[in-house]
Image (cartoon, coloured by chain):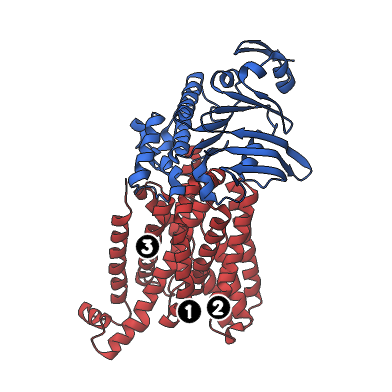
């Protein structure tokens, strides 16, 4: 028996440390005492501003975006019974960022600030629903992954079109942000806009965890042991769409973290999809906080994008999992 | 007493009639074998009678209630279902897979308590899996996997069992072991409806045989009454020599 509690506690503690470390870093040199004092509400006003308005929101955004992707990845993997399923691979993130870009490009942002997360979530839901619908009609996981790749390619192409038509360099730079993924310059207000959707998505996913375990037996047998299959599908799609969409609204499309985190977690929870959900979310959040610290530490003229770093690490892991899986099957 | 009773059950998909006005019943304490060639509609009959696939006509009741109107959980507590496709997506350990059989009782695998824990251990014991309980299921042989799926079904402790080809792909010894396990379940008061392709095995173990062809039940009765060379020719199109309950297949008719 492998309870997930020690894993959850460990990842949560590491996350607190990483968030604190992220607050210590920045262009204005500040000693540990000053940062800690500012974090708990003391210190001088300037320090508090730097820590609470700049450093902490950025790190928190990375953690929230990551945890949404980790939980969505783990849940989609459980639903589709494949370790390669993930919002990035299945084109969910790309569709969300396309929808967000489209929204920005046509200037709807002036209507309401809520429009942005709502647009990203609508895009994510559309892609997730399409894949889940296709999953009902095909038993082949390869087909599903190919459909996802098709969706991702289409969203990428549409994105390129929008960039082609971009009216001014600022719009272009905005779009690049959505495509590549970044948490630079996020404020607590940005987080407040995305967080309600993101957290409710996570709650929905948490509610589906026992069903994800039952799906280990395959859909027909899962229905046989008492799973309400249509409800499970809808809830997983809804939860993954909400949290991934909100994550994209917050940080743009960041790929592969939703594959890597559950893959690391799974052996520690006896490969139980239910018990992998929470640790995967925490680990994915932690990984993005660390990756963002890395982005800020790597000396470069223009800051690297978080999503680029995540993909540089994540894509080889994706290939590695795919190759190993093939070897195990044959 | 929980019974599965189907009356004039019909299932059409598109223009094809997969199950055509089939009536049968399954009671606790009996083992019924469902026999018929590939494509006869056996799997469809199981799904439609359970209410897992929407029927086109007729009725099917489980414990006196319409099987389509039962909630998934209520159905799972009345009948365990072993479908033909028996996949295990992740390399879980044996005990955890068996624990999934307790889903309808609200059990979460990895933290079993009370009745759930007892039921899982009993099912492991009944299927001779206790010594393998902590093994990863991707390291099991075909025979061990077949017993694992039986244990998963028994763990629910439902009064009825519907199993679709539980002995498919097994060597003769493991076929006997799975049938012995099923027979023991029936002797303890369970009712089992089992799809089989091995007529001799069915004749040896089953109380009653349901012969199905082209969506219909064409014969129904004890092995003594219904197992004849003519029947095998009509159902499967094979020549056979039948002597009492022993069957020797000789070739295509």
- SS at mark 1 in the image: helix
Task: List the residue tagged with mark 3.
Answer: A282
How far is the residue under mark 2 from the one under mark 1?
Answer: 9 Å
Q: Residue at x 27, y 80 (%)?
A: A39
Count of numbered circles on the image: 3
Residue B248 pos. (x, y %): 63, 11
Mark 3 and mark 1 lie on one chain; the one further toward the N terminus is 1
Chain to which the residue tagged by mark 3 belongs: A
User: Looking at the rendered structure, which numbered label has been put on residue A193?
Assistant: 1
SS class, disc 2 = helix
- A241 lies above or below A84: below
Q: Work out whether residue A213 can be spotted.
A: yes
Q: Secondary structure at mark 3?
A: helix
Tell me the quarter of the picture where residue B168 sits.
top right
Q: Nearer the viewer, residue A224 or A10?
A: A224
Q: In the rendered image of this protein, which colour is used for chain A?
A: red
The span from disc 3 to disc 1 (Cα, nearest Å) is 21 Å
The answer to whether dots 2 and 1 both sit on one chain is yes
Q: Nearer the viewer, residue B209 or A26?
A: B209
- Residue at coordinates 48% horizontally, 75% vertically from top-left? A194
Residue A233 placed where, x, y %?
Answer: 56, 56
Estimate the spatial distance between the alpha carbons at disc 3 and disc 2, rounded to whole Å: 25 Å
Displayed quadrant of residue B99: top left
């Amino acid at each position: 028996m492998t309870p997930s509690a020690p894993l959850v506690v460990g990842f949560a503690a590491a996350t607190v440390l990483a968030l604190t470390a992220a607050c210590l870093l920045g262009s204005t040199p500040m000693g540990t005492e000053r940062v800690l004092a500012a974090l708990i509400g003391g210190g001088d006003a300037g320090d508090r501003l730097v820590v609470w308005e700049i450093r902490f929101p950025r790190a928190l955004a990375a953690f929230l975006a990551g945890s949404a992707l980790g939980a969505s990845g783990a849940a989609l993997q459980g639903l589709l019974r494949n370790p390669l399923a993930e919002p990035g691979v299945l084109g969910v993130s790309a569709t969300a960022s396309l929808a967000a870009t489209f929204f920005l490009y046509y200037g709807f942002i002036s209507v309401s600030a809520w429009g942005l997360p709502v647009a990203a979530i609508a895009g994510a839901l559309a892609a997730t629903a399409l894949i889940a619908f296709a999953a009902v009609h095909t038993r082949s996981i390869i087909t599903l992954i190919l459909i996802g790749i098709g969706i991702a390619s289409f969203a990428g192409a549409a994105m390129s079109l929008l960039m082609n038509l971009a009216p001014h360099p600022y719009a272009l730079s905005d779009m690049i942000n959505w495509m590549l993924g970044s948490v630079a310059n996020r404020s607590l207000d940005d987080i407040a806009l995305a967080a309600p959707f993101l957290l409710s998505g996570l709650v929905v996913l948490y509610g589906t965890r026992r069903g994800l375990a039952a799906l280990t037996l395959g859909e027909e047998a899962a229905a046989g042991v008492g799973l309400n299959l249509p409800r499970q599908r809808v809830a997983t799609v809804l939860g993954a769409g909400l949290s991934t969409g909100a994550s994209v609204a917050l940080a743009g499309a960041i790929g592969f973290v939703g594959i890597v985190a559950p893959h690391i977690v799974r052996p520690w929870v006896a490969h139980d999809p239910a018990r992998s959900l929470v640790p995967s979310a925490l680990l994915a959040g932690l990984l993005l906080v660390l990756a963002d610290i890395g982005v800020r530490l790597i000396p470069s003229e223009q800051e690297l994008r978080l999503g680029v770093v995540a993909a540089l690490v994540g894509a080889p892991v994706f290939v590695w999992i795919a190759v190993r899986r093939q070897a195990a099957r044959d | 007493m929980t019974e599965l009773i189907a009356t004039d059950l019909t299932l059409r998909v598109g223009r094809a009639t997969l199950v055509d006005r089939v009536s049968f019943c399954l009671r606790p304490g009996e083992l019924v074998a469902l026999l018929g060639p590939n494509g006869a509609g056996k799997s469809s009959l199981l799904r439609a009678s359970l209410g897992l696939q929407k029927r086109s006509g007729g009725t099917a009741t489980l414990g006196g209630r319409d099987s389509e109107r039962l909630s998934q959980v209520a159905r799972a507590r009345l009948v365990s279902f072993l479908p033909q496709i028996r996949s295990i997506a992740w390399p879980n350990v044996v005990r955890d897979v068996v624990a999934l059989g307790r889903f309808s009782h609200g059990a979460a695998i990895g933290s079993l308590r009370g009745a759930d824990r007892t039921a899982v251990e009993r099912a492991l014991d009944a299927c001779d899996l206790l010594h393998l309980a902590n093994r990863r299921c991707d390291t099991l042989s075909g025979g061990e996997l077949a017993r694992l799926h039986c244990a998963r079904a028994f763990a629910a402790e439902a009064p009825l069992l519907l199993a679709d080809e539980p002995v498919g792909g097994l060597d003769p010894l493991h076929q006997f072991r799975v049938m012995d396990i099923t027979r023991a379940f029936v002797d303890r008061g369970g009712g089992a409806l089992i799809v089989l392709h091995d007529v001799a095995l069915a004749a040896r173990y089953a109380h009653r045989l349901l012969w199905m062809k082209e969506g219909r039940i064409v014969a129904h009765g004890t092995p003594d009454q219904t197992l004849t060379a003519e029947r095998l020719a009509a159902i499967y199109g094979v020549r056979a020599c039948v002597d009492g309950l022993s069957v020797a297949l000789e070739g295509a008719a």
